[in-house]
């Protein structure tokens, strides 16, 4: 038997996905924050762990950010090293 869960906001998939993503972001943040990292920095390091030597544009794509505004994220992470 499949158990169904009541979706919030009259079943709006988008609103419920947004809620789920915010909860996941908080969960990942609770792992990254004690390390002195933002969630995006944690994602960057994880992407580099999986494949070192990536270009900035590849890293941006890997973490779901626009390459045009990604350099400040790398600069902040480098300052923490």
Image: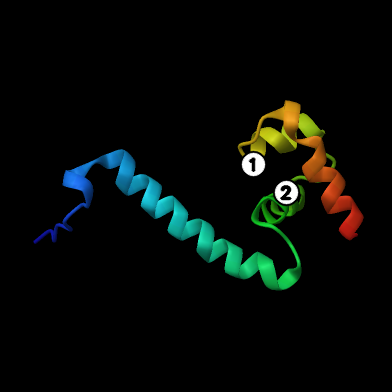
Q: Quadrant of residue 5?
A: bottom left
Local crowd at mark 2 within 10 Å, few (<14), some, or many (≥20)? many
Q: Which mark is residue 73?
A: none
Position of 8 compared to 54: left or right?
A: left
Relative height, residue 71 to residue 6 (above, below): above
Residue sitting at x 16%, y 56%: 6
Above-or-below relation of 29 to 64 = below
Q: Quadrant of the N terminus?
A: bottom left
- Residue 63: image tag: 1
For this orientation, the residue located farthest to the top is 68
Taking the view exactly as shown, the residue that stands out farthest to the bottom is 34
Name the residue at 73% across, 38% down: 59
Picture quadrant where residue 38 is located: bottom right
Give how far across and how far down residue 68 sits, in percent: 74, 26
Does the CB distance between marks 1 and 2 fall below 8 Å?
yes
Residue on which the image places disc 2: 44
Q: Quick one: label 1 or label 2, which is nearer the N terminus?
A: 2
Task: Measure the C-alpha gap from mark 1 to mark 2.
Answer: 7 Å
Q: Residue at 74% across / 31% down in the picture?
A: 69
Q: Is residue 18 left or right of residue 42?
A: left
Q: Position of residue 19 (x, y in %)?
A: 37, 52
| Image position, residue 14 (x, y; %) | 32, 39
């Amino acid at each position: 038997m499949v158990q169904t869960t009541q979706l919030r906001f009259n079943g709006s998939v988008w609103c419920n996905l947004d809620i789920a993503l915010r909860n996941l972001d908080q969960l990942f943040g609770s792992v990254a924050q004690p390390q002195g990292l933002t969630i995006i920095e944690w994602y960057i390091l994880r992407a580099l762990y999986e494949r070192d030597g990536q270009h900035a544009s590849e890293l941006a794509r890997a973490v779901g950010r626009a390459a045009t505004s990604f350099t400040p994220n790398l600069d902040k992470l480098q300052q923490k090293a």
